[in-house]
Every structure is written in C-alpha cells, then in structure tokens.
Image (spheres, rainbow, N blue to C red):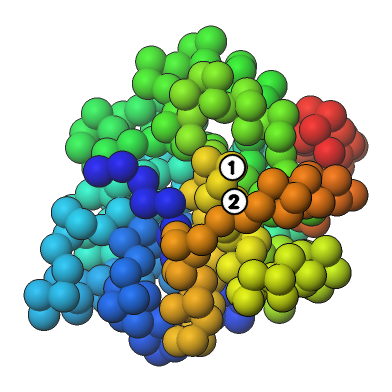
Amino acid sequence: MAIPLIGFGTAASPSNIDQMKEAVATAIQVGYRHFDTASIYGTESALGEALNNAFLNGTVRRDKIFVSSKLFAGDHHDPVSALKTTLKNLQLEYLDLYLIHWPINLRKGASHPNPREEEFLPLDIKSIWRGMEQCKELGLTKSIGVSNFSCKKIGDLLTYANIYPAVNQVEMHPLWQQKKLRDFCRNVNIHVSAWSPLGGRGTFYGSNSVMENPVIGEIAEKHGKTVAQVLLRWGLEHGVSVLPKSYTKSRITENYNIFEWSLTGEDREKIRNLPQKKIVRREGLINSTTSPYRTLQDLWDGEI
C-alpha cells in the first residue's frame, strides 16, 4: 500500500502507555492509517496492542494500516533479528516500512540519545543495508528505507544497494525546509517523510520556535486554522508525508483535518523566506576518537 500522507507519530517523551493506546484508538477512528514507531521509542508494544484491538473488533483491517518502525544503532549487527523482535512487540506478521534510524553504529544496549565514547563501533552502512535488504527478501517488511540521511549518504548507498530505499524520514518543518534534500530524493524516487513537523514542542529534543513563529501564527489566524494545521498543510503541499504526535483527542482530530483547504501563494512565499535553523543537531554523536563524525558538518555532510 502507498504511504498515507499523514501519520501518527509515537516518539513521545515521556511515554505513557495507557495514554498512547487510547490515542491510537482515537486516531484510527478519526481516519489515521499510518502509524510510526521505533524500537528506541519504547512504544512498539503499546502501538501493537492498540492496533490489534482495532483489528479484532473490526474497526479496521490490517491491510488498510501502514506501520513503520526503525532499526536502533545498537542492533545494526543483525537487522533481521531486530525486526523479528519489533514484529513480536507489535504483534504483527510484517511491517510496511523498516528504516535505519541513524547513520551510526553502536554497541548493543548503548546509551541514548548520547552514547558514551566507548559505545561507538566502526560504521559500515553497506553491510547494514544488506541486512535491511534481507528483511525485505524474507517478507518481514514490505519496504525498507533510511532516516536522518543526507544527500551524500543516500548517494553513496545507491552505488551498492540492490534494493533502493523507499523513504528517507527526516526533520522537516518551515524552519528547516530541507529543499536540497527534497529535490535530491525526488530525483532518485525516494519519498521524504517529516518527523517533528511541528518542531517537537514539549520533548527533550524539540523546540517551541516552530509553533510560536509569528509568521505561521498570522497565516493560521487568516485561514481560521490552528498553527499545527498550517505547519502540516505546508508539509503536504511540498509532497512529503507528515508525522505529528499528540495524545489529546481534539488535537489528534485537528491535525488530521488538513485536506480540504490550501495555503495561498502569498502564504507559501512568506514561509519560504523564513530563517532556517535545524533543531535536532545530535551533537552527542560527535567525538574525536571513536565516532565516524568529528564535527556536525561531518554528520550532516555540510547540510546544516
């Protein structure tokens, strides 16, 4: 099935399992059919329980739901086993999409989000990608892809991949628009999916700057929409799928209601001219001894 353009993100911080299950049930009722998780989020089991409740009570069929999860850097030595654990957590027979979460290699059980110096391992994306290809060949996932990969890292991967990545999931919102990356991915037929499309307000890694931007606020007021609706609509109009997250029923509903209206050309021009600054920079993946990245420019290949 094609990736639905609006998904439900589960990277909550902190994570409340009962709240999560209730929110997923609400999201299904509202119309969400795309649910995104990762082993490191600690939400796979809660998401799986909520989805299977919906399957059992006839609310929705499995083949109408798109589920994505991600391979933790501490499991890069064996993506197949890691995915089997993910499927067990989710109570599913297959994923629709499985992603390499970050282009880094760590010891199993490594600290998150800032690994210690001794927890880094040499990075060999070619061997990791071969494990991802095996996941697809075994029928454990319908598609494979990457997350937080630069144009250069994707370009390198394409030189040896037998199966091309279907998706690159990255930080994207009006204050980090990723035009270069979007254009590159479009040219090689890779879909871009936006995590943190609202800027991650309220999380340890996020910022209030996106939701509190005055230009976005003015556009929302003009259209009689919420700031979140404007941000998500902007993403959709740039051809990406968006993964907002909320536990609040009213916001879950509002976030989904972005299909029956459009931004104007003037709106898009104002947003296009906003100053750009990446929020999630991942300084914790940088060190001068064991990390493959000595600087942030190394990690992001100058795309920061």
> Tag 2: residue type?
Gly
Q: Which residue corresponds to the image point at 46% horizontal and 70% vertical from the top-left?
A: 257
Identify the residue under disc 1: 238
**Is residue 103 rendered to the left or right of residue 27?**
right
11 relative to 80, above or below: below
Q: Are marks 1 and 2 in contact (CB under 8 Å)?
A: yes
Q: Which residue corresponds to the image point at 45% horizontal and 87% vertical from the top-left?
A: 249
Under circle 1, the secondary element is loop
Compute the Cα span from label 1 to label 2. 5 Å
Residue 174, percent across and down?
Answer: 74, 53
Q: Which residue corresponds to the image point at 36% horizontal and 58% vertical from the top-left?
A: 34
Label at residue 2? none
Residue 53, percent across and down?
Answer: 19, 78
Estimate how packed mark 2 is, as few (under 14), some (14 to 19) or many (20 or more) residues with alpha carbons within 10 Å: many
**Could you say which is closer to the camera, residue 158 or residue 24?**
24
Quadrant where the image shows the N terminus? top left
Q: Residue furthest top?
A: 159
Q: Quadrant of residue 295?
A: top right
Identify the residue under disc 2: 235
244 relative to 226, above or below: above
> Tag 1: residue type?
His
Quadrant where the image shows the C terminus? top right
Question: Can the viewer see residue 184?
Answer: yes
Under circle 2, the secondary element is helix
